[in-house]
Image: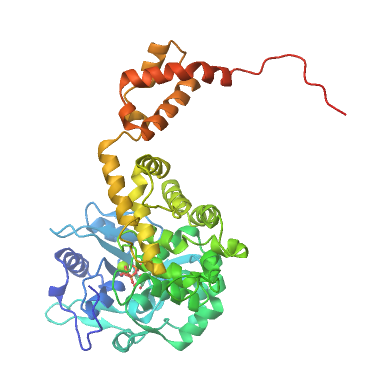
């Protein structure tokens, strides 16, 4: 649960998990200054439980790794992951560092160890993320906040402000554009006017970010699960700050595309309402919700968006590839967008329901129903008494429970055909199995061995004739 700022709140050793205390103790005992820093300090000051724990220290990575057995040190920034306490909590220990020479708005060109805590705080993105807490020195009881950039007061006032010169800070790492949006929405903060103006001025730099970094930040924005900070708030803020047209121009283009729906607004508003109606624990599905109508911007001309799901599916495939989603994720998204326009009616026969299941794939149905339910809610469609989504879902459930839906569930297999019909294994076997499946979808009672073999026997001659190579002979003479 996110809570509001807690003015006057302080941090005590007892607030820290045992593993974090163990890290601070050990480094301190060896004579190295060490503090908790960044997001975990911010969260403690807000009265919420930090998701992860970061310690910054004067000790260099080699020393940190040698002090804690089993510590892993994998990345070039010298972050050592330590599991020191009995709680085995992972603590990220990073040497005080100073970054310099950002050349490409993405990564520091050089990292230098050996700075001070103050220098380490100065390289952080926002004032609320640039506060450290030093544990009590030996013989004392209270720890000490180190807050050179006024993070505590910004936290209290609900202001998100860049550390130092905002243009420069965004210029160093354009991901800060997206992080600003995420933190502002998550904590219900206002962005300081100077920082906001710099974000607008530099929004174009987001074009240079790697797909992976944009993807991860976008998914975090979409995973927001508080009613007062719905994912649409993040997308809307990205739009207002001119970042969305850079990272997701396809979605931004829906602004101004008219919609004839019961609820007001354009296709952009509709898309954002769809996102909010999808579950927070599936941010990819939320992204699909945001993108399900992107085909509308290009099919607008026909007035009915004919084929927008097909065009949209291709667009979504391209978008998710660009954002470096996995192959499985890309195909999940593409498939859902392609099928989201199914038009169920109460007069569908059971066979039609079975064909629908086969077309969509049983495994995709829960996703597709969730997407359509959100789409309907976002359109102001009221679930009808008959012929609605719930009815289709119930019929699908009944079919799945009682009828074969994949070739594997047929009462005959390819081997049976080869044996009983004396045909050679190969494409004809697959073709006949598919036809048998069609037949069983139409009439489930056919699904027993004798009936299926009889049908196969009946079809075989025609199948083989159709598949035979064209006979050689004189070509028909061209006329004229
Ligand atoms: P969360 O609660 O989402 O983890 P966080 O603030 O802890 O938020 P992290 O990505 O875990 O974010 O980073 C930890 C700290 O490292 C931040 O609080 C900030 O001080 C610093 N930091 C992380 N990413 C950047 C960045 N791109 N630029 C500057 N500082 C950063
Ligand atoms: Mg963190």
Nearer-the-camera pick, 56 or 420: 420
115 with respect to 210 (left or right) = left
Query: Is residue 113 shown to the viewer in this render?
Result: no
412 with respect to 250 (left or right) = left
Query: Is residue 460 depicted above or below 306 in this figure?
Result: above
* Residue at 32% across, 26% down: 447
Nearer-the-camera pick, 1 or 439: 439
Q: In the image, residue 172 lies at what x, y percent?
A: 50, 72
Q: In the image, residue 343 lies at what x, y percent?
A: 43, 53
Nearer-the-camera pick, 422 or 56: 422
Query: Is residue 137 shown to the viewer in this render?
Result: yes
- Classify the position of the N terminus by image quarter: bottom left
Q: Residue 295: which quarter of the image?
A: bottom right
Q: In the image, residue 107 lies at what x, y percent?
A: 49, 65
Query: Is residue 201 depicted above or below 271 in this figure?
Result: below
* Residue at 36% across, 76% down: 185
**Quarter of image, ligand 2:** bottom left
**Tally of numbered discs:** 0
Nearer-the-camera pick, 333 or 310: 310
Q: In the image, residue 182 lies at what x, y percent?
A: 38, 73
- Classify the position of the C terminus by image quarter: top right
Residue located farthest toward the right when viewing the structure as drawn: 480
* Residue at 44% across, 60% down: 215
* Residue at 20% across, 70% down: 28
Q: Residue 232: which quarter of the image?
A: bottom left
Residue located farthest toward the top when viewing the structure as drawn: 422
- Scheme of colours in the image: rainbow
């Amino acid at each position: 649960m996110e809570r509001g700022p807690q003015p006057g709140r302080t941090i005590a050793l007892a607030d820290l998990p045992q593993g974090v205390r163990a890290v601070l103790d050990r480094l301190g005992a060896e004579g190295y200054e060490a503090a908790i820093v960044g997001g975990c300090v911010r969260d403690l000051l807000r009265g919420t439980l930090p998701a992860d724990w970061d310690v910054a220290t004067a000790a260099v990575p080699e020393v940190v790794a040698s002090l804690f057995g089993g510590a892993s040190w994998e990345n070039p920034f010298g972050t050592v992951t330590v599991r020191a306490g009995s709680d085995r909590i992972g603590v990220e220990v990073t040497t005080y560092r100073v970054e310099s020479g950002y050349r490409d708005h993405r990564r520091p060109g050089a990292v230098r160890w050996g700075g001070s805590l103050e220098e380490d705080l100065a390289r952080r993105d926002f004032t609320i993320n640039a506060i450290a807490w030093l544990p009590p020195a030996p013989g004392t009881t209270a720890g000490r906040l180190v807050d050179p950039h006024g993070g505590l007061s910004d936290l209290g006032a609900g202001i998100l402000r860049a550390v130092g010169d905002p243009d420069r800070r965004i210029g160093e790492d354009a991901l800060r554009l997206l992080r600003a949006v995420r933190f502002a929405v998550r904590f219900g903060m206002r962005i300081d006017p100077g920082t906001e103006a710099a974000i607008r001025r530099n929004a174009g730099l987001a074009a240079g970010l790697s797909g992976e970094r944009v993807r991860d930040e976008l998914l975090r924005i979409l995973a927001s699960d508080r009613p007062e900070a719905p994912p649409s708030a993040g997308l809307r803020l990205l739009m207002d700050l001119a970042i969305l047209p850079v990272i997701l121009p396809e979605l931004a283009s829906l602004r101004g595309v008219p919609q004839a729906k019961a609820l007001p607004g354009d296709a952009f508003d509709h898309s954002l309402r769809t996102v909010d109606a999808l579950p927070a624990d599936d941010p990819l599905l939320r992204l699909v919700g945001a993108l399900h109508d992107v085909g509308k911007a290009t099919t607008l001309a026909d007035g009915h968006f004919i084929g927008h799901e097909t065009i949209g599916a291709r667009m979504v495939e391209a978008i998710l590839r660009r954002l470096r989603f996995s192959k499985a994720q890309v195909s999940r998204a593409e498939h859902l967008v392609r099928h989201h326009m199914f038009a169920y009616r109460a007069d569908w026969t059971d066979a039609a329901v079975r064909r629908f299941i086969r077309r969509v794939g049983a495994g995709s149905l829960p996703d597709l129903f969730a997407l359509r339910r959100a789409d309907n809610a976002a359109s102001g469609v009221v679930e009808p008494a008959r012929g609605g989504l719930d009815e289709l879902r119930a019929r699908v459930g009944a079919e799945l429970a009682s009828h074969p839906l994949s070739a594997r569930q047929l009462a005959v297999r390819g081997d049976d055909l080869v044996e009983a019909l004396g045909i050679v294994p190969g494409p004809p076997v697959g073709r006949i199995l598919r036809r048998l499946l069609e037949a069983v979808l139409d009439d489930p009672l056919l699904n027993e061995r004798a009936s299926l073999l009889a049908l196969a026997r009946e079809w075989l001659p025609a199948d083989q004739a159709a598949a035979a190579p064209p006979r050689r002979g004189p070509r028909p003479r061209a006329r004229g």
